[in-house]
Amino acid sequence: MENFNFYSPTEFIFGKQRENECGSYVKKYGGNKVLIHYGSKSAVESGLLDRVKASLTKENIDFVELGGVQPNPRDTKIYEGIEICRKENVDFILSVGGGSCIDSSKAIAIGALYDGDFWDFYGTGKIVERALPIGTVLTIAAAGSEASGGSVVTKEEGMLKRDTGSDLLRPRFSILNPELTCTLPAYQTACGVTDIMAHVFERYFTNTLEVEVTDRLCEGLLLTLLKEAPRVINEPNNYEARANIMWAGTVAHNDIVGVGRSQDWNSHAIEHELSGLYDCAHGAGLAVVMPAWMEFVCDHNVMRFAQMAVRVFGCEMNFENPKETAMKGIKAFRKFLHEIGMPINFKELGAREEDIPVLVKNLGIKDKTWGFKPLSAEDVTQILKIAVRAEV
Amino acid sequence: MENFNFYSPTEFIFGKQRENECGSYVKKYGGNKVLIHYGSKSAVESGLLDRVKASLTKENIDFVELGGVQPNPRDTKIYEGIEICRKENVDFILSVGGGSCIDSSKAIAIGALYDGDFWDFYGTGKIVERALPIGTVLTIAAAGSEASGGSVVTKEEGMLKRDTGSDLLRPRFSILNPELTCTLPAYQTACGVTDIMAHVFERYFTNTLEVEVTDRLCEGLLLTLLKEAPRVINEPNNYEARANIMWAGTVAHNDIVGVGRSQDWNSHAIEHELSGLYDCAHGAGLAVVMPAWMEFVCDHNVMRFAQMAVRVFGCEMNFENPKETAMKGIKAFRKFLHEIGMPINFKELGAREEDIPVLVKNLGIKDKTWGFKPLSAEDVTQILKIAVRAEV
């Protein structure tokens, strides 16, 4: 196991109707003037936003609002938020939405206390030194942004998707009410599950040996998702299944299952180019990329893929031919994604083979990426070609 | 799943030689005048204490020392610590040792800022309102106190063992260097593993339905321990196995695998009377109590024990007779404990059947305990009788 630090100071407030307590948590964590940042109209129409405002008002906390965050959140909206924060002396951002909304909030949190352009911190490794505190009321189990210090946003000009990260961006609190996810369309639910699985797999595929504890925890999360995802697709109002998925999504990305081991985030990086170019859902892009990536890198460590096949997908181990077992596991993953309604190839995603050179170019690989198996531009081309033609 | 809050703000600093950084973490978390609280002579003789002091000195942090914490830490030592803290204006406690040392530190942390007797908070439910901040350098993977807000200490008069808990008692940071555990005698290592397994099982046996995610995470930790414990017993210097056990011990008790479900801490409560009366190792007492408790309560939910047997101990499911599978799992657990060198009955522990009435009386059960299966005094008597005669 490698040396590591693990620090996850976010307070998680989980369960039915907990959003009604958001005012007291904003108060607990020092907020006096709040920017409520939200995304879709559903937060308004469902009455969620009214409940949030009522809770703030009950605690005599003043607030301003900024809605309209899009999936793959845009810099234009972020600049708007930064402007409001400065003008209104906002000292706390309350993010009501999914990963896009929270990531947008984090960018605003950076920009509000920074003299230059917030974009300076994205894709550059520049260290975040100050940020407004954030709280979240999560409405989609997916991105794990409610538990992480990461943020991914998109520059509209050129649709460039870039990320940043800092412990300063970890939310002070995150309210997780699984009821709020019951109204999500099946497609978005499945996209969320796919994103969560990707967060686990990108930790699972490692070159670090002897990491049984995090291996087993990763496998536990994946087994949970295999059980619960089909249930919520068939019974959208199944609170218990929603709750298991929601906590899995949080644990999957606060890094407690990924510490002390090398990780591989190439699937996420490749996918960001797909959703950047086509504005598709991030989870849908991952469903197309990730199994293709697995097939391409399988030979790098066949036994690790065989372990996944046996422990997660319940495949029989073929002791004479572990590669066959490994490939069966990958096939089972793709079949699962198909069954929960995800696209599994370019056509189903709405992507085009002729764009591959652009996608690869946008990734901007100089020599090779880093990770479980470092990839050249040519490798990514091969992965995307597998993704073009994938079938269950 | 039940509603819950989860808050684990401790920073974990994990890996080789990390104790050399303790000074910078004390500084980061505001310590200026430190009480170094430690237990056995081994911390001195191994040079660990010197390294800790050097690290504090490097940061110009002043310190005083108090060693000699015993297993089942005593109130007498705690009063001594409180006295020192008051006299020397200590503002930070650095605990260098295992669970006993950390629990003793937490009691001192409470007492130093409280006008009355620290014992007021133990076994009474009285709420802790202030406590000095604590950091830890962990030397035994076992109690999980490095990641929890709990503390269990013993009043010498009558050898009463009582507990308290508060988020204020969660360490600000915990340094976990698996190397420090390599010199532990096999018996102590096995005691630690048993304690960790008990922390998981006491969360695993629940009356809350539909908690797949925490079930799976619990099982992942248990599987890890089944693999790694025999390795460290046979190869004490196996760093990787030590590391897996150490992280498992922390995750097992910061409650991330126990949230949203009812739990059952009766085995711990019963064991506290054993180690209170005989001053035996806590883990050793648990090895005797826990399988006996399992046999006694098995009928309360046979399928849950069958799940443990199949998923954790790899038993074949007997679909015609799940009880047989359940009992096989419990047998496998006891056999495992025996194989890592733990006592499994009263005689091996050094306990006496004729003391059962005293042990039961000390527990002070009024009507019934709470938990997976609430226990009457008569139930506890039955459990201890099973423990008297247990065999592999």
Image (cartoon, coloured by chain):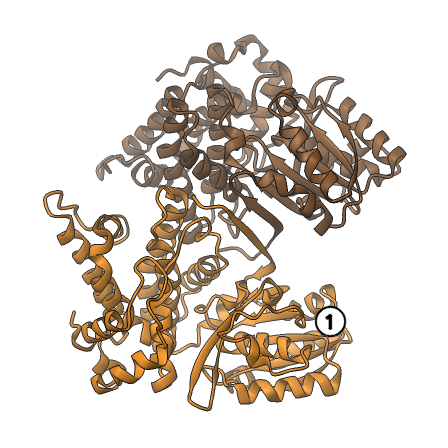
Chain colours: A orange, B brown
Residue A66 placed where, x, y %? 61, 86
For the N terminus of chain A, give its image quadrant: top left
- Specify the farthest residue to the left: A320
Residue A91, quarter of picture: bottom right
Foreground pick, A143 / B308: A143
For the C terminus of chain A, give its image quadrant: bottom left
Residue A2 placed where, x, y %? 45, 46
Residue B51 placed where, x, y %? 65, 33
Horizontal placement of B303 versus B161: left or right?
left
Q: Is residue B123 visible?
A: no
Q: Residue at x 67, y 35 (%)?
A: B52
Disc 1 packing (10 Å; few <14; some 14–19; many ≥20) = many
Amino acid type, residue under disc 1 in the picture: Gly
As drawn, B92 above or below A63: above
* Residue assigned mark 1: A31
Foreground pick, A276 / B146: A276
Q: Is residue B363 visible?
A: yes
Dot 1 falls on which chain? A
Q: Residue at x 36, y 25 (%)?
A: B336
Element at label 1: loop
Residue B368, quarter of picture: top right
As drawn, B87 above or below A62: above
Horizontal placement of B307 versus B188: left or right?
left
Horizontal placement of A163 versus B69: left or right?
left
